[in-house]
Image (spheres, grey):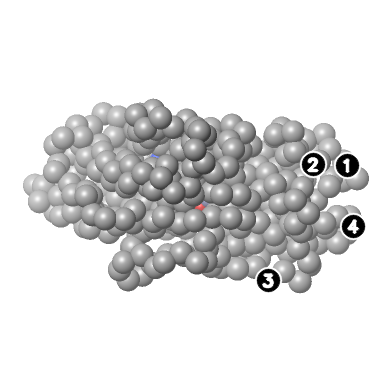
Amino acid sequence: MRVLGIETSCDETAAAVVTDAREVLSNVVHQQLADHQPFAGVVPEVAARAHLDQVDAVVARAMAQSGVGWDDLDAVAATAGPGLIGGVLVGVMTAKALAAARSLPFVAVNHLEAHALTARLTDDVTFPYLLLLVSGGHCQLLVVEDVGKYRRLGTTIDDAVGEAFDKTAKMLGLGYPGGPAVEQTAFSGDATRFDLPRPLKGRAGCDFSFSGLKTRVRMAIEALPPGDLIQQDIADLCASFQAAVADVLAERTTRAIETYQTDHLPAGQTGTLVVAGGVAANQAIRARLTDLAAGNGLAFAAPAPKLCTDNGAMVAWAGVERFRLGLQDGLDFRPRPRWPLDPEAPKAVGAGVKA
Ligand code: KG4
Ligand code: ZN
């Protein structure tokens, strides 16, 4: 089975062809860096127009590089939410048009499910596994029970973790995209110099909070001598911030492991901890979670960094997973700007909860 996947929910225009034998035949990603850099962040309207400019060429390259003809495809999948709706519409309309023109089935993919299932493409992980989903829009702990079946154990009560990286980078003048810049700068920094908080650490449950951490980074910057920040201050703040994030993620995940092992994992089965989403590209966070899994008798899986940040292969793979179960969608499928993986999940404590 060969599926074309299209991703346009944020600032990457991406397309890929993937098979049910877990082969990535092509994976083309166009990053809209130059379009958004002047604004130090993603501007939804700019993103939507850039997707429209790029999507046909990106799909054509993905098809050409895969060596697969249109007649050899089994389905076309596209991210149909959650995300910036202008971009999502571009990807969905493109996929629907291709499906109609080539008489192929269309599969509407939840972007979060695409991140969630990537570890089955890369590492053949079996259900049920514990997933830490860390991206620009989300920070959640979920038990992945099956395709389409998720139990959310915790979520952020304010900012997503990637958002915290991006805002920290912006305050430090590191520009956009922030996560990779903070990680690079942190290498030459002293993580013990700034005493930053670990929000919600030690509290019951598995929810997250990052807005207080971001505020404390701003206060630390303001407390430094007036004038331009010197390079060592920036590096030390990046390292201190990254260490605080890694601590929080590890502590919240430790709690989720307890629930997963007690309530979800069948007796005798070795469980797996999976990390996915753009922030999972961060080496310090991966290293921390690797140790945590080993210490708790769990296997660990993290997709290669280029499959953690948004890409078409994860969408094509989610398309494979759904289509081989007989799941497909009509051309009247309406894109969903909000689309929680576990609609039954209790609300996190606090305001402004993200789905
Ligand atoms: O999954 P993703 O590509 O898009 C969303 O679905 O949101 O995640 C993007 C987020 C951004 O906030 C970006 O700064 C962050 O992932 N990110 C990183 C790293 N690479 C990307 N954060 C920390 N370290 C990285 N190496
Ligand atoms: Zn994403």
Question: Tag 3 or tag 1, which sits nearer the N-term?
Answer: 1
Q: Are marks 3 and 2 in contact (CB under 8 Å)?
A: no
Q: Quick one: label 1 or label 2, which is nearer the N terminus?
A: 2
Q: Are marks 1 and 3 in contact (CB under 8 Å)?
A: no
- Whether ligand 2 has any atom under 8 Å from the Cβ at mark 2 is answered as no
Residue 49 appears in view: no
Secondary structure at badge 2 equals strand
Q: Amino acid at mark 3?
A: Arg
Q: Earlier in the sequence, mark 3 or mark 2?
A: 2
Location of residue 267 in the rendering, given as x and y in whole percent from the top left corner: 49, 38
The answer for how far apart the CA atoms under marks 3 and 2 are is 24 Å
Measured in 3D between alpha carbons, the distance from the residue under mark 1 to the one under mark 3, in whole angstroms, is 27 Å
Q: Give the mark, 1 or 4, whose residue is nearer the N terminus.
A: 1
Q: Which residue is mark 4?
A: 103
Res 185 → quadrant? top left
Which residue in the structure is indicated by mark 1? Answer: 72
Task: Indicate which disc residue 2 carries.
Answer: 2
Q: What residue is shown at x 67% (from left), y 38% (from top)? A: 27
Give coordinates of residue 119: x percent, y percent.
57, 38
Q: Amino acid at mark 1?
A: Asp
Whether residue 212 sits left or right of residue 7 in the image: it is: left
Earlier sequence position, callout 4 versus callout 2: 2
On the image, the x and y values in percent for residue 55 come to 69, 53
Tell me whether circle 3 and circle 4 mark residues in contact (CB < 8 Å). no
| Three-letter code for the amino acid on which mark 4 is drawn | Ser
- Residue 190, quarter of the rendered image: top left
Q: In the displayed structure, does residue 283 sit left or right of residue 171?
A: right
